[in-house]
Amino acid sequence: MHGCEMEKMLSGYGLMTAQILYRMPDYENLLQTYAWQAYDLAPDFPELFKFLDFWDRKLDAAIQSVQYTHRELIHPGEWRNAEGEFVLN
C-alpha cells in the first residue's frame, strides 16, 4: 500500500466501488456496465462526482444509473502503533 493511500484512509477516505449503467449513442437499446473504484470520502463523494463530471464532458455514452458502495477501511479505534519484533528460526 502506498503512503498517500494510507494517509487518505487515516483521513476518513474509504474504498468506493461504483457500477455505472450506460447507453452508447449507436446502440440505445443496449445497456452496458462499467465498474470503477477509487478512494473517496463519504457522504460527499468528491472523487465519484469528479469522475462522473469527466464522463459527462468527454464521453458520448449516456449514463442510465449509478450504484455505489463505500467502506471505510480504517476506523479511529482500529489504528494503533505496535512496537516489537518476533524472530523466527
Image: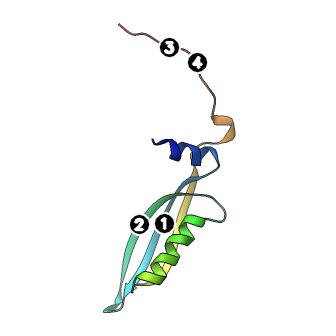
Q: Nearer the viewer, mark 3 or mark 2?
A: 3
Q: CA distance from mark 1 to mark 3?
A: 40 Å
User: Vertical placement of 39 versus 1: above or below?
Assistant: below
Q: Which element is circle 3 on?
A: loop
Of the image marks 4 and 2, the number of the one nearer the N terminus: 2
Residue found 43% across the figure and 77% down from its top: 21
Q: Quadrant of residue 89?
A: top left
Q: Which residue is mark 1?
A: 18
User: Vertical placement of 34 versus 69: above or below?
Assistant: below
Residue found 56% across the figure and 45% down from its top: 73
| Disc 4 residue crowd, few under 14, some 14–19, many 20+, Cα 10 Å | few
Of the image marks 2 and 1, the number of the one nearer the N terminus: 1
Of the image marks 1 and 3, the number of the one nearer the N terminus: 1
Q: Which residue is mark 2?
A: 35
- Where does residue 67 sit, x and y in percent of width and height? 52, 70
- Where does residue 57 sit, x and y in percent of width and height? 47, 83
Q: Which residue is mark 4?
A: 83
- The outermost residue toward the left is 26
Left or right? Give the position of 11 relative to 17: right
**Nearest to the observer: residue 31 or residue 82:** 82
Residue found 43% across the figure and 64% down from its top: 36
User: Vertical placement of 51 versus 43: above or below?
Assistant: below
| Disc 3 residue crowd, few under 14, some 14–19, many 20+, Cα 10 Å | few
- The outermost residue toward the front is 4
Three-letter code, disc 3: Glu
User: Vertical placement of 43 versus 59: above or below?
Assistant: above
Q: CA distance from mark 1 to mark 4?
A: 38 Å
- Where does residue 24 sit, x and y in percent of width and height? 35, 87
